[in-house]
Image: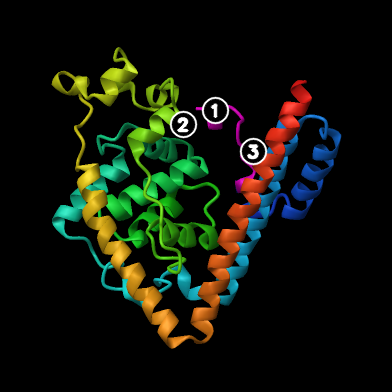
């Protein structure tokens, strides 16, 4: 809900269409951070925002060197799993429920309904809905990426399609792990009072958040029951993706060459980024403590 009220910049459409440049946003943000250097929380937030601007341009650069990632799996091991071919009737049913915001998973549905209405949703929800579709529903990222691009007011091919591959578990195969978001766990973390869900799912009016989480609405609400078992699909489909990542890793290491070197650089970049973020957060906590006293 905060993302609708100004907790995010909403500058992405302007960056996409060039009505404002990344450079000008970066420079103004840095100047503002200087003005707020005695306010650790604001300074920390603005620094994180500038890092996102760097990632924005890195995706554009990646598409320039690897234009095929807009439509092709980054690694061939995934070609039988993720394909743009028409969906089977069963998969099409799942896909339509996801497109309509009627999966039975409140945070997924609220986010998709926001997308259809506003042409926008925040990054975390984009990632969560993408993981749900690819991992839990077992539907190729090609279909989800196209849906996003059809609705997003800030749709950027370089960012959108690579992020979909990332959330589908295709990228960075040298890493031993990949993320699968739990939509219901994210309610307590990202929407603890349910305001976002209540705003986009009027079927829940009159129900407490606990009623929603325990599905007590199912007897007399028009809201659908879950279309799948999240834990089961996470285990089964997650293992399929994990095995393909392992196969990719083995091939890359055994063959070496440019593709392997590129994968090594990708892993090192991600690892260093999170190490830097952890260090940055610790410094922020120290400044925050000093300011309080």
Per the picture, the main secondary structure of the magenta-coloured stretch is: loop
In the image, 32 versus 146, the foreground residue is 32
Q: Which mark sits nearer the N-terminus, 3 or 1?
A: 1
Residue behind mark 2: 190
Q: Which mark sits nearer the N-terminus, 2 or 1?
A: 1
Identified at 48% across, 37% down, the residue is 118
Instruction: Give the x, y percent position of residue 245.
Output: 36, 68
SS assignment at label 2 = helix
Image position of 201 (left or right of 24): left
Instruction: Give the x, y percent position of residue 269.
Output: 60, 64
* Label 2 – label 1 distance at C-alpha: 10 Å
Q: Which mark sits nearer the N-terminus, 3 or 2?
A: 3
Q: Which residues are magenta?
A: 1-12
Residue 187 position (above or below residue 94): above
- Mark number, residue 2: 1
Task: Determine if the magenta segment contains residue 5.
Answer: yes
SS assignment at label 1 = helix
* Label 3 – label 1 distance at C-alpha: 11 Å
């Amino acid at each position: 809900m905060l993302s609708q009220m100004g907790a995010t910049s909403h500058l992405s459409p302007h960056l996409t269409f060039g009505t404002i440049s990344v450079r000008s946003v970066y420079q103004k943000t840095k100047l503002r951070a200087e003005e707020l250097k005695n306010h650790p929380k604001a300074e920390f937030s603005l620094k994180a925002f500038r890092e996102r601007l760097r990632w924005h341009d890195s995706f554009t650069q990646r598409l320039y060197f690897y234009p095929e990632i807009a439509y092709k799996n980054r690694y061939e091991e995934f070609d039988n799993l993720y394909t743009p071919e028409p969906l089977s009737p069963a998969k099409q049913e799942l896909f339509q429920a996801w497109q309509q915001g009627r999966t039975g998973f409140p945070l997924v549905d609220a986010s998709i309904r926001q997308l259809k209405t506003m042409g926008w949703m925040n990054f975390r929800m984009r990632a969560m809905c993408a993981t749900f579709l690819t991992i839990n529903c077992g539907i190729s990222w090609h279909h989800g990426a196209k849906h996003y691009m059809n609705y997003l007011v800030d749709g950027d091919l370089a960012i959108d399609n690579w992020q979909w591959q990332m959330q589908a578990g295709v990228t960075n195969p040298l890493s031993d792990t990949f993320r699968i978001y739990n939509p219901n766990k994210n309610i307590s973390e990202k929407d603890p009072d349910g305001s976002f869900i209540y705003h986009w799912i009027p079927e829940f009016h009159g129900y407490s958040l606990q009623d929603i989480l325990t599905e007590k609405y199912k007897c007399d609400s028009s809201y659908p029951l879950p279309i799948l078992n999240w834990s089961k699909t996470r285990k089964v489909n997650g293992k399929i993706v994990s095995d393909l990542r392992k196969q990719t890793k083995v091939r890359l290491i055994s063959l070496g060459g440019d593709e392997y070197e590129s994968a090594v650089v990708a892993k090192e970049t991600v690892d260093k980024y999170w190490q830097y973020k952890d260090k940055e957060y610790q410094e922020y906590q120290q400044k925050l403590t000093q300011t309080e006293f």
